[in-house]
Amino acid sequence: MANHKSALKRIRRNEAVRLRNRYQHKTVRNAIKKLRGEENKKEAQKQLPIVVGMIDKLAKRNIIHANKASNLKSKLASRVAAM
């Protein structure tokens, strides 16, 4: 166990950040699933910019890798265009 006050604070902070990252990542995964399951093209086109923004935010904060974000956005865009 940590002995220093700053180390104890760091442990608390790391846990809070980990939980926040996990929540955001799960939220984006659910949004992607919802978009992939969408049958209506107009609805999908309306959702796409929102989901892309969420993915970009995760990549900016290093929750997911930038290349993974790029691949996800590309695949989602091509899926919506092919509807």
Image (cartoon, rainbow, N blue to C red):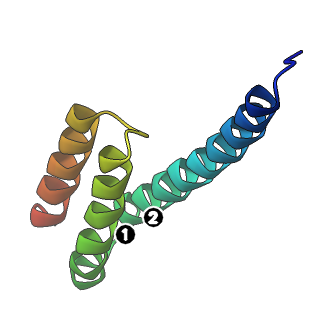
Question: Do the numbered discs 2 and 1 sit on residues whose CB atoms are within 8 Å?
Answer: yes
Q: Which residue is mark 1?
A: 38
Which quadrant of the view contains residue 36? Answer: bottom left
Depth check: give the residue in front, 41 or 48. 48
Q: Amino acid at mark 2?
A: Lys
Neighbourhood count class around disc 2 (C-alpha, 10 Å): few under 14, some 14–19, many 20 upward: few
Kindly report the distance in space between the C-alpha atoms of the residues bearing marks 2 and 1. 6 Å
- Quarter of the image holding residue 50? bottom left
Nearer to us in this view, 38 or 21: 21
Residue 68 versus residue 50 in the image, above or below: above
Q: Is residue 52 above or below residue 63?
A: below
* Disc 2 element: helix
Mark 2 vs mark 1: in front: 2
Task: Provide the residue designation for mark 2.
Answer: 34
Q: Residue 79 placed where, x, y %?
A: 19, 56
Amino acid carrying mark 1 in the image: Glu
Image position of 35 with respect to 75: above or below:
below
User: In the visual, does 81 lie left or right of 75?
Assistant: left
Picture quadrant where residue 64 is located: top left
Q: Secondary structure at mark 1?
A: loop
The answer to which of 81 and 39 lies nearer the viewer is 81
Q: Residue at x 30, y 82 (%)?
A: 43
Horizontal and vertical percent for residue 42? 22, 84
User: What crowding class fits label 1: few (fewer than 14 Cα within 10 Å), some (14-19), or many (20 or more)?
Assistant: some
Residue 4: image location, x then y, percent = 82, 23
The quadrant of the picture occupied by the N terminus is top right
What residue is shown at x 23% (from left), y 54% (from top)? Answer: 76
Q: Please, which residue is most extreme toward the top here?
A: 1
Residue 63 percent coordinates (x, y): 43, 40
